[in-house]
Image (tube, rainbow, N blue to C red):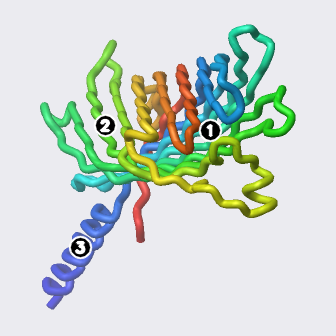
Amino acid sequence: MKFKVLFFALMSCATAQAQSADSAKVIYRSHMVGIGGTDVLDTYLSEEHFRGWGVSFLSTVERKRPGRRWSTLVEHEANLSVASDRANTHREMEGAYNFYWGRLRGWKFFNERLTLQAGAVGTASLGFIYHASNGNNPAQGRFHLNVMPTAVAAYRFKLFRKPCMARYEINLPLAGVMFSPNYGQSYYEIFSRGNYDHNIVFTTFVSAPEWRQMLTLDAALSRSFTLRIGYLGNIQQSKVNNLRQHIWTHRFLIGITKQFSVVRR
């Protein structure tokens, strides 16, 4: 009788531990700041190209379960830039918030040193461009929803006996919708008079090509914290309603990555 009680107690403990391990979730969270160049063109405001400098904040969270091939990727990207025209007589300010949420399937090679992932992310972009010299239409709003195929490659190695990882991520557009005034249409007509003129536009990789890539290098500081440096390039452009727009940002990044586990009870 005592043997049976002990046996069932051990089996219960083993089952509970297996369930805890199965429900454990590994989370990689990084926060980075960046600085670099910005190129702005918006023909609704001006035919001129504007170039300048900007700052960015990037937060990345990746969640995965041990032994599972699928992971969840969440990224928050905020940018603020100030740019001037070629004559340095006019200035524009550009700001945007970009949100990315996606699912990736992974494969491991070379004794798990190389990880390849592929999937798709849904993106939402909200921003503005302000032209200081315009009187009637000084600002342009930006809103865009998109679906983007995504690929990630990560390689783990040691440098000076320290664990390191090189990671490359690329996002390309597929299809989405965006807001845009029509050529010659004012925001007063849209929002005060309610004159709709094809202002919600269906987009594809042809009418709104986008190319976002990020290359980072991680160097372990401790078991939980990692120093991360890298480059982020975000090329957003569109040609809809006879208007052209592009926002090109290039950022040098530096930040910290933290790894931790969460067990669902």
Q: Which residue matches tag 3?
A: 15
Q: Position of residue 121 (x, y in %)?
A: 39, 50
- Is 99 or 184 nearer to us in this picture? 184
Q: For the residue labelled by badge 2, is the local secondary structure a helix, a strand or a loop?
A: strand
Mark 1 surroundings: few (<14), some (14-19) or many (≥20) residues within 10 A: some
Looking at the rendered structure, the kind of residue marked 2 is: Val
Q: Residue at x 63, y 34 (%)?
A: 79
Q: Are marks 3 and 2 in contact (CB under 8 Å)?
A: no
Q: Are marks 2 and 1 in contact (CB under 8 Å)?
A: no
Which dot, 3 or 2, sits closer to the camera?
2
Q: Position of residue 182 (x, y in %)?
A: 63, 47
Q: For the residue labelled by badge 3, is the local secondary structure a helix, a strand or a loop?
A: helix
Residue 12's mark? none
Q: Position of residue 61 (x, y in %)?
A: 47, 46
Q: Which residue matches tag 1?
A: 78
Q: Which residue matches tag 2?
A: 152
Q: Residue at x 33, y 25 (%)?
A: 166
Whether residue 141 appears in this view of the structure is yes
Q: Residue at x 59, y 25 (%)?
A: 34
Q: Which residue ends up furthest to the front in the rendered image?
A: 184
Looking at the rendered structure, the kind of residue marked 3 is: Thr
Q: Is residue 32 left or right of residue 12?
A: right
- In the image, residue 30 sits, relative to residue 33, either above or below, namely below
Q: Position of residue 30 (x, y in %)?
A: 50, 38
Give the CA separation, mark 3 to mark 2: 35 Å
Q: Residue at x 86, y 34 (%)?
A: 135
Q: Is residue 166 left or right of residue 8?
A: right
